[in-house]
Image: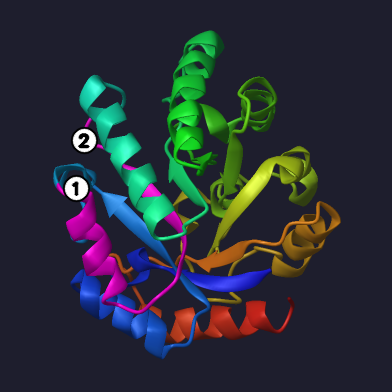
């Protein structure tokens, strides 16, 4: 395992500056958010010119652990073209996996399995792993549903975000069935209430040691991505907390 950093930690910077800071903070790799509504790289821009996007990323002199995708449309022909382009960019940049958002709550299991089979195949063609993130408001907030998706969709993995479970006061062992399917992890500190999604390190209930231990049992050897988001209404500066979590995780892996 190694410690990476999400570009969402520096979302109010432009992308070159965000990657420069990640490099200067000596993270092993970056976790790049490619969001259509974001301030950095957008899926539509990647589709328009994959080579240009690759050249832009290469100038940063940073390795990438994963791409975190959010599209303008949940699923459409345009979305699938953008996914394919981002997966091609991932292959070019030697990025092993891309993370997408699962369907909203209430989606029929068969419908989501069908969609993700198509998406996972598009990723596989480019030699990339597709993962869905565990996230409140989507079908993967349900542990059983998330695990079942991975069993039914060949090659599909999970991006684990323990904060989503913590803020619903799920017991520490509540997400244990997910660890065999985890291919990527994003971390911050969180409390057990919805409004406590992001707290200063040490003020929440995230048990990093237990998470690392469970991952180790499943022979997980990928990134632990620091994902303390630079939100406009954040009550504390994020950079000191990013450094704290980086050093904490590095001391345990």
Quarter of the figure with the N terminus: bottom right
- Relative height, residue 183 to residue 225 (above, below): above
Question: Does residue 252 appear left or right of residue 34 in this picture?
Answer: right
Q: Is residue 37 visible?
A: yes
The image shows a total of numbered marks equal to 2
Instruction: Answer whether residue 54 is magenta in the image.
Output: yes
- Outermost residue toward the right? 217
Label 1 secondary element: loop
N-term-proximal mark, 2 vs 1: 1
Residue at the spot 40% in from the left edge and 52% down from the top edge: 90
Quarter of the figure with the C terminus: bottom right
Q: Residues within 10 Å of mark 2 (few under 14, many from 20)?
A: some
Task: Determine which residue is flagged by label 2.
Answer: 72
Question: Does residue 216 appear left or right of residue 122 in this picture?
Answer: right
Residue at the spot 29% in from the left edge and 65% down from the top edge: 231
CB contact under 8 Å: marks 2 and 1:
yes
Q: Quadrant of residue 229?
A: bottom left
Q: CA distance from mark 2 to mark 1?
A: 7 Å
Residue 66: image location, x then y, percent: 47, 57
Q: Quadrant of residue 86?
A: top left
Residue stretch rendered in magenta on the structure: 49-73
Q: Nearer the viewer, residue 126 or 66?
A: 126
Task: Determine which residue is flagged by label 1.
Answer: 37
Residue at the spot 46% in from the left edge and 15% down from the top edge: 107
Question: Does residue 72 appear left or right of residue 155 in this picture?
Answer: left
Residue at the spot 68% in from the left edge and 23% down from the top edge: 148
Label 2 secondary element: loop
Colour mode?
Answer: rainbow
Residue 113: image location, x then y, percent: 54, 17
Q: Nearer the viewer, residue 141 or 71?
A: 71
Residue 205: image location, x then y, percent: 65, 63
């Amino acid at each position: 395992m190694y410690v990476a950093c999400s570009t969402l930690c520096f979302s109010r910077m432009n992308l070159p500056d965000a990657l420069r800071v990640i490099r200067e903070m000596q993270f092993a790799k970056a976790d790049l958010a490619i969001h259509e509504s974001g301030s950095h790289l957008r899926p539509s821009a990647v589709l328009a010119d994959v080579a240009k996007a690759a050249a832009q990323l290469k100038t940063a002199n940073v390795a990438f652990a994963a791409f975190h995708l959010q599209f303008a449309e949940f699923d459409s022909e345009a979305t699938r073209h953008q996914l394919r382009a981002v997966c091609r960019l991932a292959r070019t940049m030697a990025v092993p996996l891309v993370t997408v958002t699962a369907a909203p709550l209430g989606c029929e299991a068969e419908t989501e399995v069908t969609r993700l089979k198509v998406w996972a195949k598009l990723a596989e063609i480019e030699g990339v792993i597709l993962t869905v993130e565990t996230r409140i408001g989507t079908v993967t907030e349900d542990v059983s549903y998330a695990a079942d998706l991975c069993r039914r969709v060949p090659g599909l993995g999970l991006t684990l975000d323990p904060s989503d479970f913590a803020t619903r006061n799920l017991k520490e062992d509540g997400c244990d069935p997910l660890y065999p399917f985890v291919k990527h992890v994003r971390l911050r500190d969180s409390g057990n209430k919805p409004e406590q999604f992001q707290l200063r390190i040490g003020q929440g209930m995230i048990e990093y040691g237990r998470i690392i231990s469970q991952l180790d049992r499943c022979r997980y050897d990928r990134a632990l991505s620091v994902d303390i988001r630079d939100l406009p209404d954040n009550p504390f500066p994020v950079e000191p907390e990013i450094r704290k979590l980086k050093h904490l995780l590095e001391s345990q892996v």
